[in-house]
Amino acid sequence: MNIAIIGATGRVGTRLIDEALRRGHHVTALARTASRLPTRDSLTTRNVDATDSQALAAALAGHDVAISTARFEQLKAPQVVGPVKTAGVPRLLVVGGAGSLFVAPGIQLVDTPGFPAAYKSEASAGRDFLNALSGEADLNWTFLSPSALFEPGERTGKYRAGKDELLADAAGKSWISMEDYAIAMLDEIEHPAHPRQRFTVGY
């Protein structure tokens, strides 16, 4: 497939590139400084300011799938959805956040007393993004939320999937490596199971 990754130079974006290339896909890396990425077979880089809707739409044209890894405070849902539709890209996958996952009936993680204040604004913006996608009838979207702790780590090839509730392991730890998250994202691209849905992955 031809996969475009918005925000490809970030920590998640680079791991998505690695996983997609490992599986034989062609990747177009989109970012302000995408040309700084190392040259690799099947990787095209395009320097694009994602807040420029016309430039983003032009860069997305001709792709089978778009993945947005952008921060939610920097790129709102209409700024992603609009160019994806204009470009005629049939699928959008979004690197989500854990803040909008439920930890109890009617209670999302971002609204719990212990949620870190430093991350609350971005997490709230992520919830807004998901809510906006939920009203999209004309776009095949998927929003993939990681577990609470989401850091670079080991590529184990193992994960379990959930839907709207925060996942935790037997010890109560909620976590997923960025490498295994990338596996889950590419699995969803290759074998779509969550059209117009949010789901989550963790250990």
Image (cartoon, helix red, strand yellow):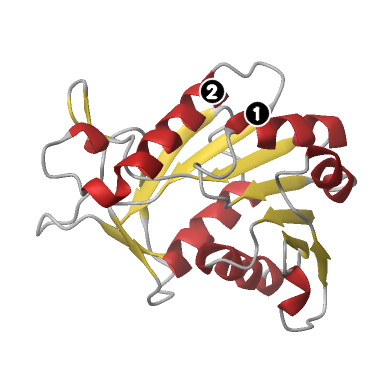
Give coordinates of residue 24: x percent, y percent: 75, 69
Residue 62's place in the image compared with 193, above or below, is: below
Amino acid type at image mark 1: Pro
Q: Are circles 2 and 1 on residues that touch, CB within 8 Å?
A: yes
To which quarter of the image does residue 163 belong? Answer: top left
Residue 21's place in the image compared with 175, above or below, is: below
Q: How far apart are marks 2 and 1 (CA)?
A: 8 Å
Amino acid type at image mark 2: Ala
Kindly identify which residue carries mark 2: 132
* Residue 8 in the figure: left or right of residue 58: left
Q: Which residue is drawn at 65% across and 16% down?
A: 137
Please rate how many residues cluster around mark 2, counting C-alpha atoms within 10 Å: few if below 14, some from 14 to 19, many from 20.
some
Q: Please tell me whether mark 2 sits on a helix, a strand or a loop.
A: helix
* Residue 100 in the figure: left or right of residue 53: left
Q: Residue at x 73, y 83 (%)?
A: 38
Kindly identify which residue carries mark 1: 78
* Residue 192 in the figure: left or right of residue 163: right
Question: Which sits earlier in the primary sequence, circle 2 or circle 1?
Answer: 1
Q: Which residue is drawn at 79% across and 30% down?
A: 85
To which quarter of the image does residue 35 belong? Answer: bottom right
Q: Residue at x 57, y 27 (%)?
A: 196
Give coordinates of residue 12: x percent, y percent: 52, 63
Give coordinates of residue 170: x percent, y percent: 12, 57
Q: Please tell me whether mark 1 sits on a helix, a strand or a loop.
A: helix
Q: In which quarter of the image is the N terminus?
A: bottom right
Residue 15's place in the image compared with 36, above or below, is: above
Q: In which quarter of the image is the C terminus?
A: bottom left
Give coordinates of residue 61: x percent, y percent: 88, 44
